[in-house]
Image (cartoon, grey):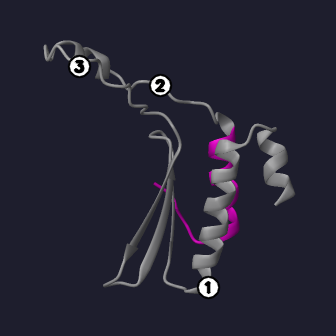
Amino acid sequence: MPHYQAWEEFTRAAEKLYLADPMKVGPGPGLEASRAGSGTGGPPLPAVGRDEVRVVLKYRHCDGNLCIKVTDDVACLLYRTDQAQDVKKIEKFQSQLMRLMVAKESRSAAMETD
């Protein structure tokens, strides 16, 4: 799990990770088999994707650290900071990723405009 020290490197790597396959969602290995044998008789549960790109924010008040992690279960990118001015950068980056995830236009064109 690489810990990035430079914000620009982290954002480039995270965008590249997402843009490599933005629609990569599917059931995890063995998930449906474990549900099939449950015998509850109820409707099947929705498949939970294991390979989608996720963004996790974590703040530790005792340390004053904010951590952002971008992962697709194969690659995991991590950036930590204790600087207050980095919070705005992280907020802007997260909103850019959210716009990419819901955009109907070309994914690469959306990132270039910001």
CB contact under 8 Å: marks 2 and 3: no
Residue drawn at x 80%, y 49% is 110
Task: Return the residue at label 2.
Answer: 26
Q: Is residue 11 magenta?
A: yes
The N terminus, quarter of image = bottom left
Crowd class of label 1 (few under 14; some 14 to 19; many from 20; radius 10 Å):
few
Left or right of 64? Residue 91 is right
Left or right of 50? Residue 107 is right
Q: Amino acid at mark 1?
A: Gln
Residue drawn at x 17%, y 13% is 41
Task: Return the residue at label 1.
Answer: 85
Task: Classify mark 1: helix, strand or loop.
Answer: helix
For the residues marked 1 and 3, what is the alpha-carbon distance in whole angstroms?
46 Å
Q: Earlier in the sequence, mark 2 or mark 3?
A: 2
Q: Find residue 103 and report its horizontal and vertical position in percent.
A: 73, 42
Above or below, 80 against 104 in this view is below
Quadrant housing residue 88: bottom right
Looking at the rendering, the stretch of residues picked out in magenta corresponds to 1-19
